[in-house]
Amino acid sequence: MTVARTPAVLETLLAALRARVSGPVLTATDDLQPYRRDRAADPGAGTPLAVVRAQSVTDVQAVIELAAAHGVAVIPRGAGSGLSGGASAVDGAVVLSVEDMREIAVDPVTMTATAGPGVLNAELKAAAAQHGLWYPPDPASFEFCSIGGNVATNAGGLCCVKYGVTRDYVLGMTVVLADGSVVELGGRLIKDVAGLPLMQLFIGSEGTLGVIVSVTVRLRAAPPPSSTLLVTFDDIDAAGEVVVALARTGRLSMLELMDRTTVECVEHEHRGGLDTGACATLIVQSDEPGEAGAATIAESAAICTRGGAITVSQARTAAEGQHWAQLRRGAIPSVEAAAGSLLLGDVGVPLPSLGRLMVGIEEIAREAGVPIALIAHAGDGNTHPLVMRDTSSAESIARADAAYGRVMDLAIALDGTITGEHGVGRLKRPWLAANVGSDVVRLNQVVKTALDPQGILNPGAGF
Ligand SMILES: Cc1cc2nc3c(=O)[nH]c(=O)nc-3n(C[C@H](O)[C@H](O)[C@H](O)COP(=O)(O)OP(=O)(O)OC[C@H]3O[C@@H](n4cnc5c(N)ncnc54)[C@H](O)[C@@H]3O)c2cc1C
């Protein structure tokens, strides 16, 4: 859709928004600036007409109805921590922020929680913990990303290897559709097969099909404290082989990898005691209780040693293990701080191809002369190649862009995906058809047209 409208039409829209919406309608340049981009820092981000901070479902409905009536696009936005440009603003659009919609209710009997879309993942975890319960999905950004954004991207994280991704916990949601109507999907039921599984369409839909205004998730009993190994390798291929063997045990609750460049950046920022000389570092965790956990950790240590690890250290306390995991969580900001500007990859492959992907990424970095730091939710076969670039040099940008494209092509060639958990957003669209096939892209568009015939929701994102 075209979002350029005459000044008179835009003024009418702003006046109508101010009249109907209870939350702030921001239009000053300084106020708009923080809402132009997400953490991917999309260079193509536009300048919105306005940012509306919705306070209620009625506010969300009003924004969508008025924007649709004026032919203006709406960019749904949570906490803006996305890494694919999914929440990048479009020139002349209305950014619809749900960051203020933060009510939470925990039902310990059904072991569910219902949260407003702006509730941070960490706030949901904390509310569940007050009842001895746990919300597992744990993106490394859990302290500053929203549950609405998590559902809209089907966020993963560090414990997916055992506990799955956001989709595995969503039981119900309320969505405002592109015509402003409100639909309830699912609920608090563990089992429910009435009608087509339409709720699943909205999970991972990146704000293109509707605005999620409430989410009901399943909770679990809190797990016991974890036991953790820190393992180093002088060869990333060997680390990849060991990951495959460790994952086959089927018992680990965390299996994360950082390469040397990443560890150097993390150590520079945090001085956390990691070995900057190792080619690859694994963090291996079990949250099984008592003897079962001890047996899993002993077996994992033996697998690492047999697989050529240079060091295998067991955390003396659960707190030490959490410290290592916390260093991993801080890896992307640490690399960001060192590089200044990053192209963030999120490519994944079937687990047996993990070593080939990681070795291939190293080769691409070498051949292109571009530093690429590598982080992986290794147990899921999901890697984050962080392509570093010097934005003061057009030549460096071009080399980094080319290297990023080669990483995408490599993942596709290995039967993988261009995005395991961050979403296509705006930055990965050029590779989508090669990844899923043009017939599947067409099918995406059929669904989009059925739900948003005017194309007002997040145009340019996803597909
Ligand atoms: C340091 C760091 C570490 C990270 N680690 C992980 C990780 O381990 N795993 C992982 O999966 N991600 C990770 N991320 C990425 C990011 O945090 C997730 O994608 C998160 O789910 C985005 O949530 P958000 O609230 O910030 O959404 P936003 O960035 O605001 O939006 C993301 C997308 O969702 C849409 N959207 C947001 N809210 C709604 C809504 N209510 N209704 C409809 N659409 C909506 C937006 O339009 C956009 O397309 C990380 C990011 C950073 C900066």
Image (spheres, grey):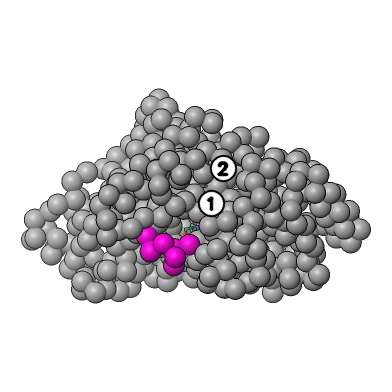
Residue at mark 1 to residue at mark 2: CA–CA distance: 8 Å
Give the magenta part as a residue range.
335-341
Q: Residue 158, how many percent across, how many down?
A: 63, 56
The residue most toward the right is 291
Q: Is residue 248 magenta?
A: no
Position of residue 142 in the picture relative to residue 449 (left or right): right
**Magenta stretch prevailing secondary structure:** helix
Whether residue 445 appears in this view of the structure is: yes
Label 1, ligand 1: CB separation under 8 Å: no
Residue occupying image coordinates x 14% and y 52%: 4
Find disc 2 in the rendering and name its residue. Answer: 358
Along the viewing direction, whichever of 89 and 249 lies nearer the viewer: 249
Which amino acid, mark 1? Leu
Q: Residue 265, how many percent across, how many down?
A: 52, 64
Find disc 1 in the rendering and name its residue. Answer: 374
Q: Is residue 339 magenta?
A: yes
| Element assignment for label 2 | helix
Quadrant housing residue 52? bottom left
Which amino acid, mark 2? Met
Position of residue 355 in the picture relative to residue 11 (left or right): right
Label 2, ligand 1: CB separation under 8 Å: no
